[in-house]
Image (cartoon, rainbow, N blue to C red):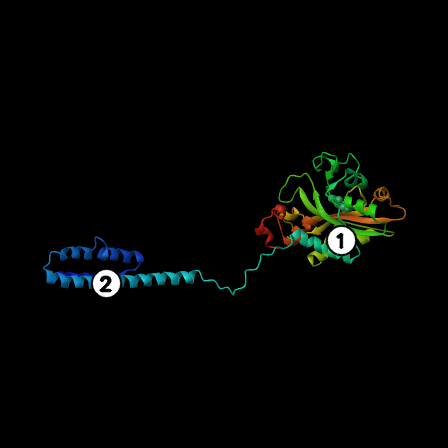
Amino acid sequence: MLEATLEDLQARALERIRGARSMEELEAARVEALGRKGALGHISKELGKLPPEERARVGRLLNAVKQCLEESFEARRKEFEEEALRRRLEAEWLDLTLPAPEPKRGHFHPVTQVQAEIEDLFTSLGFTVLDGPEVETEYHNFDALNIPPDHPARDVQDTFWLTDGNLLRTHTSPVQIRGMERFKPPLRMIAPGRVFRNEEVDASHEHTFYQVEGMMVDREVSVAHLIYFMKLMVNAIFRREVAVRLRPGYFPFVEPGFELDMQCLLCEGAGCPACKHSGWVEMIGCGLVHPNVLRMSGIDPEEWMGFAFGLGLTRLVMMRFGIDDIRYLQSGDLRFLHQF
Ligand code: PHE
């Protein structure tokens, strides 16, 4: 009677061991069969009620079943453990022979890229690249450039004045003055750099932007030279023939003065929001250096003459890359910068 129960119990327990799909299921089956309050324990309590020789026989069977089940549980438990280990090794496997990931490389800002191209072009033409301070004196930014004290360009609306009487340069033209103070003519120089104006920021205006100043002083310099260099520069930057036009323009430090416009490359001159529907974009202020400016810097205007230009580098970069909002350039936004 008990023997049949034992055999039945063994068969059912073995079946559950085989069928267990997880360690938890296996453990539940083990507790049920071998646990303190389990089926085998229950049967061993019944043993005492049996007559002695039957008790010995059933007792032996009980021990045999117990041992068999313990071994089976243990074997299955090992299988689960090995399986778990195998999975972990597979998931955490590292191939130490693989090359390490390359460090991420940065690249030059679009403004820096075009600035470098302009520097290369002009140095190849015998120009020197000069640098000047971003905090300027009123003298270099205005007076020496023949800008009278009552000129609207000095208005507090445009200029960031510092409390010590100096200012953030509103253009790169003061570097012309510094160049003339430092070098004797003949001279050819360019000066790329940041300039600052107290302007309301929108899609086409920034308080901080870039210009490239250029100047050539020699014995015979004409508007023809100026136009030659301007065309050369614009065509080199856009790598093709770009239509330009010269309009009269007023700057106190040149006479005659011009505005050089470039055909809008976004609409090919048809008119679009970027060129305010005119088909042209103002790119360069330029002209022949005013005699007063030469004189103030110690150069005799009877003997020397020159041209000067101020290129809107930021605007040029926007045209070159088709950027329609100036604010992207200083945003530091990598989604934008990665494109160049
Ligand atoms: N400095 C002028 C500007 O900022 C540009 C310019 C430079 C004009 C040199 C003439 C000669 O607008």
Q: Is residue 63 visible?
A: yes
Left or right placement of residue 273 versus residue 123 in this view: left
Q: Name the residue beneath numbered marker 1.
A: 230
Residue at 81% across / 40% down in the picture?
144
Specify the farthest residue to the left.
51
Residue at 68% across / 51% down in the picture?
316
Q: Is mark 1 within 8 Å of ligand 1?
A: no
Residue 16 placement (x, y as % from top left): 24, 61
Q: Name the residue beneath numbered marker 2.
A: 67
Q: Residues within 10 Å of mark 1 (few under 14, many from 20)?
A: some
Name the residue nearer the viewer: 328 or 222.
328
Left or right placement of residue 274 versus residue 252 in this view: left
Residue 95 placement (x, y as % from top left): 49, 64
Q: Residues within 10 Å of mark 2 (few under 14, many from 20)?
A: few
Residue 8 placement (x, y as % from top left): 17, 62
Q: Is residue 269 visible?
A: no
Name the residue nearer the viewer: 101 or 216.
101
On-image quarter of the C terminus: bottom right
Q: Amino acid at mark 1?
A: Met
- Classify the position of ligand 1 by quadrant: top left, top right, bottom left or bottom right: top right
Left or right placement of residue 35 versus residue 235 in this view: left
Q: Amino acid at mark 2?
A: Gln
Q: Nearer the viewer, mark 2 or mark 1?
A: 2
- Helix, strand or loop for disc 1: helix
- Helix, strand or loop for disc 2: helix
Residue at 66% across / 48% down in the picture?
275
Specify the farthest residue to the front.
52
Res 202 → quadrant: top right
